[in-house]
Image: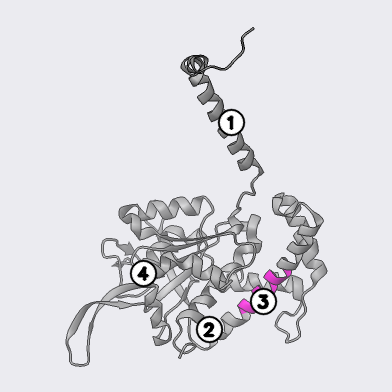
Amino acid sequence: MDARITKKRLNLLLSYDWLKMIALIVAAIVLWSLIFTTAATRITPAQQFTIFNYSGTHVTTLFDDLDGALKKKNVFSYDILNITPMDATAGQEQAETLIQTRLMTNEGDALFVSGDERNKNSSVSYTDEQGNTFSPTYLQQFLTMYTPYAKPIYGEDGYISEMEAFLGEYYGDFRAENASINKEKVEEVFRARIKKQKDKRFKKEKKIKAGIQSEIERIEKYRDSLLKFESYVAANYVSVVETTVYSSDYDGNVTSKTASYSINLCPNQYMENLKELVYYTVSEKDAEGVTHDNVYTAQNIHLVLLDTAKSNYAYSLYESLSLVNYLVERYCSALNS
């Protein structure tokens, strides 16, 4: 039998079987794609950190590069695998849809928003308990729409009190100068968590032991972060403020709730350099009485700390305070004079 491969036979094969060959190649690509997708470690809500800019403020190119800056400074712990700065205003009329969609899919950790009375949304009006109608600041607007996602800073169920309780589980008195972390407790909780989450990064004992050391460093960083934040508040570089949010039922009855929903990143001149990252514009008069329009300012720009992952990934909530400290250390004139 003549089984030689000739040019004529090869042409006949390609003429009649090329569709089968292409189908086999596509099937092989799809198969390998499925294998790699299944084997890869999926990022959980705890392992991604999303920073929003809300309506009413603008961002510079530094905002787009924020992920690189935060990684370079090692701001977050080892467990944050993905940092995403997201400017909701880029979508213009789709901004609210974008924010709502992200929050409902457990994405979102911090949000820049203006709380300044000079920067209100005049196209919207709310009614207070006395029946007075007013245009809200963008902070009030956000909180009215998304209060369940905004974590109060102070209070019984607030960010700081919960963080104190969290650290207390590992330190006892974490404020003591010689406070020592309970490494056995860290290991116990860590092993239970990676088993429950089936974290593929820690399949072998060698990897688990390295993970335990990283976990110790993560919790130690949380302690340092809280103490540092408290010192910045005491120095009045940033401040925690209360905001009143109004809501009405179907019968038109108006109720209000006041809580410390945000951190004012620029309560005074110390943090005015924040406008290099995020800003809005105002009209101002100079010393000679001349009015200047479109003046950049960061006055009363707030950061809302979001709680989207809830109880399943509560251990990661305290990464946000590291972002606040980074912003102070990067933009506070008193620290960089």
Which kind of residue does numbered mark 3 sit on? Arg
Q: Is residue 255 left or right of residue 90?
A: right
Mark toward the start of the polypeptide (3 vs 1): 1
User: Counting other residues with Cα less than 10 Å from the Cα at mark 1, is it few (<14), some (14-19), or many (20 or more)?
Assistant: few
Q: CA distance from mark 4 to mark 1?
A: 45 Å
User: Counting other residues with Cα less than 10 Å from the Cα at mark 4, is it few (<14), some (14-19), or many (20 or more)?
Assistant: few
208 w.r.t. 168: above or below:
above
Which kind of residue does numbered mark 4 sit on? Thr
**Location of mark 3 (residue):** 223
268 w.r.t. 51: above or below:
below
Nearer to us: label 3 or label 1: 1
Mark toward the start of the polypeptide (4 vs 1): 1
**In terms of depth relative to the viewer, which is nearer, 235 or 243?**
235
Which kind of residue does numbered mark 2 sit on? Val
Q: Let me know if residue 224 is in the magenta part.
A: yes
**In terms of depth relative to the viewer, which is nearer, 278 or 120?**
278
Which quadrant holds the N terminus? top right
Q: Residue at x 70, y 50 (%)?
A: 200
Q: Is residue 80 visible?
A: yes
Q: Residue at x 45, y 59 (%)?
A: 146
**Location of mark 4 (residue):** 60
Do callouts 2 and 1 mark residues in contact (Cβ within 8 Å)?
A: no
**Location of mark 1 (residue):** 28
Mark toward the start of the polypeptide (3 vs 4): 4
Which kind of residue does numbered mark 1 sit on? Ala
**In terms of depth relative to the viewer, which is nearer, 69 or 251?**
69
**Magenta region, residue range:** 216-226
